[in-house]
Structure formats: C-alpha cells, structure tokens
Amino acid sequence: MPDYDWAVPPGGEGKITVRVKTAGKQGRLRDTVRVYSNDPTIKEMRLTISAFVKSPIYYSPASLLIKGKRGKPIERAVELRAGLDRPLELTPVYFNLENQLTYTIEEIEKGRRFRVLFKSKPDASSAFHGILNLKTNYPEKPQITLPIRGRIKEELGGKRN
C-alpha cells in the first residue's frame, strides 16, 4: 500500500512512498504503480519500479509446468545458480511425484550451476502437482522447494491433413 501526500498545490511537489515485498523473490523485479490526479492534462501516470533482488541461490523457472500429450515424452528443466562466492552443493531430500516423473540433477559448472531435468513417465496422471525439496550447504538458504504442476492430455484420435 503506497503512502503519499494527499494534496499537492499546482506546480508543487509531492512524495509517494512504495514498499515492495521481496520475500521469496529473486533476480530482476519490476512493478508498476498507478498515480491518479485531478490535473486535466495528466489524469493518470504509471511509475515503474525496477530492482534486482540478490539471492544466495537463483533458479529459473521458480515453478515448473509440465504439459503435453500422453504417449510423447515430456521433458522440462530448472536451472540453478550459486549467488555466493563459494561452491554450492545440492542434496535431494523429498520428492512426492515418483509415480508421475523422474528427475536427474546435472552439475553444469562445478559448484556453481546445476540443471534439474524432469521427465514424464508413460503412465503419468492427467493432472498432478507436487514438490522437489533440495537441501543446500548454504546456511543463508538451507533448502529449496521447487513446485511442480503437470497436465497430460489424451491424444485425440486421427490426424487431420
């Protein structure tokens, strides 16, 4: 909720204070605030706030959507990167989608960059959601929770030409 000067005289200046909650956010952040006035030439103005939220560990995407057609292999990946100047270690501690997916953790750059590759199983449900929890060696971020959703559609009969 912004805090602002309620009345600004013509030609005067006012102050707008905006607080952005960054908990759970990482990397580039952009938000917009609309300002309305009774000025006949500028009734509405948009202010854009840009920032970079530092994090011990960056990962993208923040949540994973796995969708496709049944019978075709579906693969999606999450990239993780160390945000600190010391090696990162990842250890899987919990995964509740064993019946739907398999996953592998690849170290792309030793102690710095990782890729978690998810693959659908042939008998995956049509809709599912769950998580993969990874333990880290960073006290600043001891655990990462990757939310995963999936939608597998049945192949419709016959091809159209």
Image: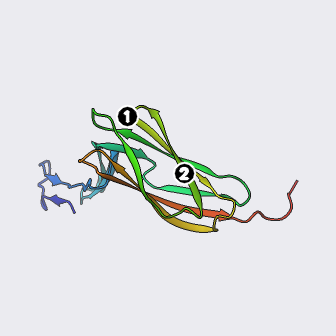
Q: 76 or 13, which lies in front? A: 76
Res. 124 mark: none
As shown in the figure, which amino acid type bears the numbered disc 1? Gly
What is the x, y in percent for residue 155? 76, 63
Residue at 58%, 58% (x, y): give it.
101
Residue at 16%, 60% (x, y): give it.
3
Q: 22 or 145, which lies in front? A: 145
Q: 130 or 9, which lies in front? A: 130
Give the residue pinned by disc 1.
Answer: 111
As shown in the figure, which amino acid type bears the numbered disc 2? Tyr
Give the residue pinned by disc 2.
Answer: 103
Residue 152 appears left or right of 43: right
Q: Earlier in the sequence, mark 1 or mark 2?
A: 2
What is the x, y in percent for residue 149? 52, 62
Looking at the rendered structure, the secondary structure element under dot 1 is loop
Residue at 12%, 58% (x, y): give it.
5
Q: Mark 1 and 2 residues: CB-CB less than 8 Å, in contact?
A: no
What is the x, y in percent for residue 55? 29, 44
Query: Vertically, is 132 above or below 112?
Result: below
Looking at the rendered structure, the secondary structure element under dot 2 is strand
Mark 1: give few (<14), some (14-19) or many (20+) Cα within 10 Å: some
Location of residue 120 (image quadrant): bottom right
Mark 2: give few (<14), some (14-19) or many (20+) Cα within 10 Å: some
Q: Assign the N terminus to one quadrant of the image.
A: bottom left
Location of residue 159 (image quadrant): bottom right
**Spatial separation of the CA atoms under disc 1 and disc 2:** 19 Å
Query: Vertically, is 96 above or below 19?
Result: below
Residue 92 appears left or right of 125: left
Location of residue 85 (image quadrant): top left
Residue 37 appears left or right of 133: left
What is the x, y in percent for residue 52? 29, 41
Query: Vertically, is 115 above or below 156?
Result: above
